[in-house]
Amino acid sequence: MPSPDTAVRRTDYTPPAYLIDTVDLAFDLDPGNTTVTNRMRVRRNPQAAGAALLLHGQELELLGIEIDGAPCHDHRLTPDGLLIEHPPQDFELRLVTRCHPQENTSLMGLYVSNGNFFTQCEAEGFRKITYFLDRPDVMATYTVTLRADRQRYPILLANGNLAEQGELPDGRHYAVWHDPFKKPSYLFAVVAGQLVCREERIRIGSGEEKLLQVWVEPRDLPKTAHAMASLIHAIRWDEQRFGLALDLERFMIVAVSDFNMGAMENKGLNVFNTKYVLADAQTATDVDYGNIEAVVGHEYFHNWTGNRVTCRDWFQLSLKEGLTVFRDQEFSADMMGTESGRAVKRIEDVRVLRQAQFPEDAGPMAHPVRPDSYVEINNFYTVTVYEKGAEVVRMYQTLLGRDGFRRGMDLYFARHDGQAVTCDDFRQAMADANGRDLTQFSRWYSQAGTPRVKVTGHHDAAARTYTLTLRQECPKVGVEMLPGTPDKLPFHIPFAVGLLDTSGHDLPLRLQGDDGAAATTLVLDFTEAEQRFTFVDIDEPPLPSLLRNFSAPVIVEHEYTVDELAFLMAHDSDPFNRWEAGQRLATRQLLAHVEAIRRGELPSVDTFVIDAFRQVLRDDTLDPAYRELALTLPGESYLGEQMDEIDPAAIHAARQYMRQRLATALHTEWLAAYHNHQTPGDYRPDAASAGQRGLKNLALSYLSELNDTHVTQTAQVQYEHANNMTDRLAALNALVNGGQSAQEAASAALAEFYSRFEQEPLAIDKWFALQAMQRATGAQRVIDTIRTLLQHPAFTLKNPNRARALIFSFCAGNPAQFHAADGSGYAFWADQVLALDALNPQVAARLARVLDRWRKYTPALRGAMLDALNRVAAHQGLSKDVREIVDKAIG
Ligand code: B3K
Ligand code: ZN
């Protein structure tokens, strides 16, 4: 465990001793040495104690310091920054510092990418630009002057509105930007370089005109149409759904290819990873198009949820992230345009939650949605804070209804606009706007772990009632296991249920003692450790449909029979639970196969999954996109989580066996699906066309299990004639994973793909990732391919997208190969964590998390994993980012 004195604790929060009202920053931009002159108005915080002023600063050279125009001698540099022991009550502080953007490989603070300047400040990067109170509850008004060589840096951008620009001697020029909104330092941004933009002017609901710009490198301009369209959709949607309008005169998005994450919501100047901006038919897949829409929406929605109302401290991160993920999920669902599309989106989101968040919530990094302590805040931008946080926000909406939720949002903004607040403030607004007591609901913020809900049903024929008994439990996890942590208490779970009669119709539901109108889905307020809910007027034993639309982030345990699951799969009116029933059916079968394989037996052939899958595949009344999800087997990591001990090789073998069985048994149906879901004509990324391609390419991937030369030919033809990346990549994937018979064609196609896209970094990322996630053919070890690819001229550790494409895809996306019994994957992992840590601790720490769950693996693997973790932990000079992860993992 990290030593207690390095951890920051939530309960230690104190208000800042000083406030900063205005900041005037002047940058003399130069890649080697950039000088920043910072003039700010500082005053004592009347609400706080303490007289000394400690300004955060990192990797800065202090060139000058003045207070009210006179040189200041009453200061000293500390490991954390600049300490001024006895400053006046209210004064102007002028600081001149120097930093070195060209050498900055951490991609935090000011750095250079492809010759252009960018910044990244969240969470604590502003302190690498100037000395400052770099914490989210210090909100100031910023004016920024940028000075640079005009030829090399023709474009100079910062937050807010352009106030002035002009020429300077020696071929230099300048621009002055003023942001009228007070903001915390983490939302600060500047960009400078050779960029061009697509721009549009739109009128918002009030009639005001707004300027929208998407800035990219010149050759990428043709790939910006989809991002611009997504931005306009997001602006309209937020006005319509939440009454929230764009507040600035202009809104800019800038794309950069070296970026630690997806995108950043800097006020009025969003900075995006190119992966979430650039799209055209040739280089982006349907999934990319969807992701761009979601991320553009997400960052735009932060303008209100995050920027106008921000976080008091970083423990409150989910206040903005959980809420904004919920908003982007709802946006994407609405953009799907149909009910079935909404269900598809919901299923995809829940899949992410289960595959990534549930394991996190059961491992050494388990933490509540509002964590209680951290060593490095960047390690807490997690699926728990984001995705579980979004589920927590969704539960408010489920409990209060859409209108009630909207009332809560309105009150939240009425109370807190312009403030830095807490998750409790949000909950209070929801409670007050609806006259509801949400005290117990706060446990979703303070307790970690995934609750398990055991459900039993009892029909009383004489009383004509049906009683569901719900029991919840949630054992301690992660830091909760430390001595002295309080016992956990029951959660307030909105548990949505329906009851199906024998013909598969929903029964009207009324709870005993409740005389309201009957509904077909009821949301039960499940608040106790054990609780009974009795439904009246139920003549026959019904079949319960539990946790409809996944109404809470819990695991439901109920003893369904195979027939009951097949029945739900065919009849449940809740599309989420129809999908869920199929997944349960497949999971049950797959886990039995895993056990058989581990015992050295052959898995037995069951027909019920095949029959159920055949029915779905043939059912043309179901949307293709929905069918694609229903026919995709649960992933290997999800299956591993269902076992006491994860055995990646056995899981892979069982899943492959099932895929081959389904490929053979449904051969005719897959072929029909392949031919019936072609999308001739120009590429269109809309949901319906994407759904067709999704099902068609799923069919191709099942068919490629057959090791059949006809399938190889089909894939080759598709590869050659594809007019879009979705089809080309799916064909390449079918070839690379198509067994021996496709090997030659696969090598040729891989070479063709590389030369076709050599100048397209995002496509080359796909080329690396696809090979990193490939299955082994014959005696080939994928690790050898990976080590060869590390030497490829197009590979570099410095570009996070490239590192993720090869290294993360292998370590996290290819479990059977990564967990090879000889430990080769783990040795590779340790090498790469250390190599990355020397360049970019944030990215290294993400990779470090891959071995988090080592205790859950079979004993042989566990030992090798621990060895690799110890090797990393023993390294001198590890960043605190990686140190926190490996120390917690080793425990
Ligand atoms: N707020 C940023 C994430 C910053 C991550 C810092 N390590 C992107 C987002 O969630 O919108
Ligand atoms: Zn966000």
Image: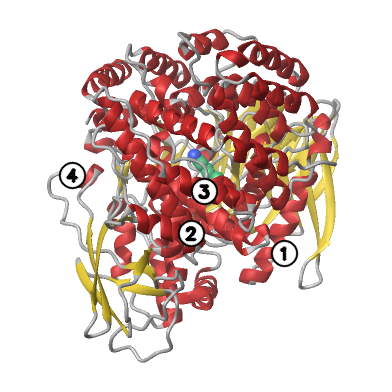
Residue at the disc numbered 3: 630
Distance from Cα at disc 1 to Cα at disc 4 = 46 Å
Residue at the disc numbered 4: 481
Residue at the disc numbered 1: 236
Expressed as whole percent of the image width and height from the top left, the position of residue 175 reads 78, 42
Expressed as whole percent of the image width and height from the top left, the position of residue 39 reads 61, 45
Residue at the disc numbered 2: 570
Q: Is residue 398 left or right of residue 730?
A: left
| Residue type at numbered disc 1 | Arg
| Quarter of the image that includes the C terminus | top left
User: Given contact means CB atoms under 8 Å apart, are the residues at marks 3 and 4 in contact?
Assistant: no
Depth check, mark 2 against mark 1: the one in front is 2
Label 2 crowd bin: few (<14), some (14–19), many (20+), radius 10 Å: some
Depth check, mark 4 against mark 2: the one in front is 2
Q: Is residue 838 left or right of residue 413?
A: left
- Mark 3 Cβ and ligand 2 under 8 Å apart: no
Against 713, residue 225 (above or below) is: below
Label 3 secondary element: helix
* Earlier-in-chain disc, 2 versus 3: 2
Residue 32 numbered mark, or none: none
| Residue type at numbered disc 3 | Ala
Against 691, residue 466 (above or below) is: below
Distance from Cα at disc 3 to Cα at disc 1 = 32 Å
- Front-lying residue, 693 or 436: 693
Distance from Cα at disc 2 to Cα at disc 3 = 12 Å
| Residue type at numbered disc 4 | Met
* Earlier-in-chain disc, 4 versus 2: 4
Label 2 secondary element: helix
The colour scheme used here is: secondary structure
- Front-lying residue, 656 or 876: 656
